Image (spheres, rainbow, N blue to C red):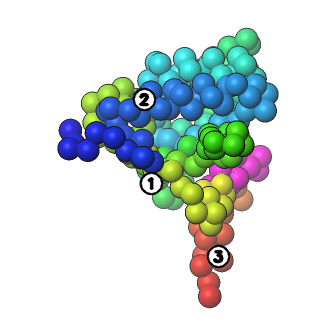
Amino acid sequence: YSRTQHYRSLLVAPKDLRNQLADLIEHESTFGTEGHIRVKLNSLADPAIIEALYAAAQRGVQIDLLVRGVCCLVPGVPGVSDTIRVRSQLGRYLEHSRIIWFAHGDQHDDGDDQPLFLIGSADWMGRNLDKRVEVMVPVTHPKHQVWLDQVFEFGFADDSVRWELDSSGGWHRCGPLGFQHGDAQERFYRWVTTKQRR
């Protein structure tokens, strides 16, 4: 797929991304109830990744998923996925961003684990992880991390309009009755325009 075989920072499929994601999920699960994973994707359908998330949830890790389309993971199953919640949000903008956050993903030599932000092209599906060249990039600049964190803040706000997946596989609309009062995309747009004004 590429002349380059080894990367210092990039997570690249089909060679390494799957295993690196599994390692990051496993590392976060070692923190038990102190662990936290937040993910924004278009689709989540890869069986091995889903099993890794279930295993992390069974160790108490809080897992928040914003999945715009297909989601094969079932949240809220007692003893299996109690600590996982899944939301879907559709709005004015057709979004394709993939953002992944691990509370303890950035592992330092001194043993001090910091949050890790990743952005890139890969959904968590077999075709993305095994059959395509896909890249996830660590985001290290504090300003950019704040922006990505804000996407999650608006996306997981209790007063945002969203669909939530239950343990029986059913989706339920939640939030304000009027979409204009709980549009996470609009809120982020307004936040960005405020930040960009000089």
Range drawn in magenta: 151-159
Residue 184, position in %: x, y? 64, 56
Residue 50, position in %: x, y? 53, 22
Left or right, 155 with respect to 176, comes to left
Q: Which residue is mark 3?
A: 195
**Is there CB contact under 8 Å for labels 1 and 3?**
no
Q: Which residue is mark 2?
A: 18
**Is there CB contact under 8 Å for labels 2 and 1?**
no
Q: Residue furthest bottom?
A: 198
Give neighbour class at mark 3: few <14, some 14-19, many 20+ (Cα, 10 Å): few
The answer to which of marks 1 and 3 sits earlier in the sequence is 1
Q: Which mark is residue 94?
A: 1
Q: Secondary structure at mark 1?
A: loop
Residue 1, position in %: x, y? 20, 38
Measured Cα–Cα span from mark 2 to mark 1: 26 Å
Residue type, mark 3 in image: Lys
Snapshot quadrant of residue 130:
top left
- The relative height of residue 100 versus residue 46 in the rendered view (above or below) is below
Q: In the depicted view, which residue is nearer to us: 172 or 60?
A: 60
Residue type, mark 2 in image: Arg
Q: Is residue 19 magenta?
A: no
Q: Residue at point 28% right, 39% down?
A: 5
Snapshot quadrant of residue 16:
top left
- The relative height of residue 68 versus residue 171 in the rendered view (above or below) is below
User: Is residue 35 visible from the viewing direction of this image?
Assistant: yes
